[in-house]
Amino acid sequence: MRGVRILIGLLVVGSVVAVQPGAATGSPTATTVADSGPPETADEYLSAFQSMEGVPAFDRYTQFETIRSLAVSKLQVTEFDDATEREMESTLRLLRSFRDAYQAAQNGSTSGSLEAANRTLSSAESLNEQGLTYAPLADIAISRFYEDRGDEFLQAAANASRTPEQIEQLELASVAFRRAGASKKFSQVSLRYQSVRSEYQRNVETMNASASTASSFLASCSSCSDVQGALASNGLQTFEYYLQTGSKITRLRDAESLASKHGLSDRASSVASLREDVSTARSTLALASVGVLLVYGLVLAVVAMLVGHRLVTWSEAVQASQVGEIVMIEEVNDA
């Protein structure tokens, strides 16, 4: 049915354009009707349509130029009644919004381009509701415009240096392909968008967890930047803190790598700074741990010396008592 309507629309193009302009309802004014609102008379509409001749958007998407030419021809041969006025109003709104969509796209305004394209799509639906034979031409052109925009967004995603920007462009491409009716491209881009976004979210959670645990560690490790302070504040726990720093540094290094992978330079810099703080604490705790070992080694040596001295004294006393017993036994035997 859509193909039939397009064929009918093309036939209408040939028949209407062939009509001579002698039956015009009036001569067009020299000035262009402002875009602030719809014209009120046939002459104003005619002037508005004629002023849009040569618009770059219509040169690129020729279906809109065909629609513009049809509107000009129809105004010259048709009575300007309520139905015609409604048709001309919808058609002019269609052309203006598409012109704005194309210009915004050329200027790099993504949001402005899509907003104007959405208005164009709404106007095209209005033409379809009125049963106008050239309405399918607008459908073809706006679908092509959306698909072109989707291809541009897809290329922008490929060129993006930061994953958040890539995700944004993939989402825009997905929306554009859906509105273009390009189901295959829409399916492929949607799957890619979901995959990239899911991986990014997982990696962000990993980075957040690594940074959080490292920050908590530094907050709980009293005076970790000073050897004497670490010894005085942490005591035996100093060695435990030292062992923890190894895993913290490894996780932070992985987080820094993930941040660089996703183009998050600021995040990579902050993680690197945090890793340096933990590395500094590790060096301090290493020296403090050696101090702990020396102190407790000295204590153990003193204890061992005291115990050894007691053992020696006890051994000598035992030997002395045994000597006394031997002397007494010898005296008894002599008697």
Image (cartoon, rainbow, N blue to C red):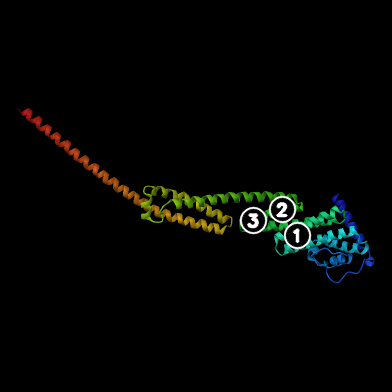
Q: Which mark is residue 116?
A: 1
Asked whether disc 1 touches disc 3, contact meaning CB atoms under 8 Å apart, the reply is: no
Asked whether disc 2 touches disc 1, contact meaning CB atoms under 8 Å apart, the reply is: no
Say which amino acid is labelled 3.
Answer: Gln
Q: Which mark is residue 166?
A: 3
Q: Quadrant of residue 162?
A: bottom right
Q: Earlier in the sequence, mark 2 or mark 1?
A: 1
- The residue sitting at 56% across, 56% down in the picture is 260
Circle 1 Cα neighbour tier, 10 Å, few/some/many (<14 / 14–19 / ≥20):
many
Q: CA distance from mark 2 to mark 1?
A: 15 Å
Q: CA distance from mark 1 to mark 3?
A: 23 Å
Residue that numbered label 2 is attached to: 175
| Left or right of residue 109, residue 269 in this image | left
- Label 1 sits on a secondary structure element that is helix
Q: Nearer the viewer, mark 2 or mark 3?
A: 2
Say which amino acid is labelled 2.
Answer: Val
Q: Earlier in the sequence, mark 1 or mark 3?
A: 1
- Label 2 sits on a secondary structure element that is helix
- The residue sitting at 28% across, 46% down in the picture is 301
Depicted 298 relative to depicted 106: above or below: above
| Left or right of residue 175, residue 127 in this image | right
| Left or right of residue 51, residue 264 in this image | left
Q: CA distance from mark 2 to mark 3?
A: 14 Å
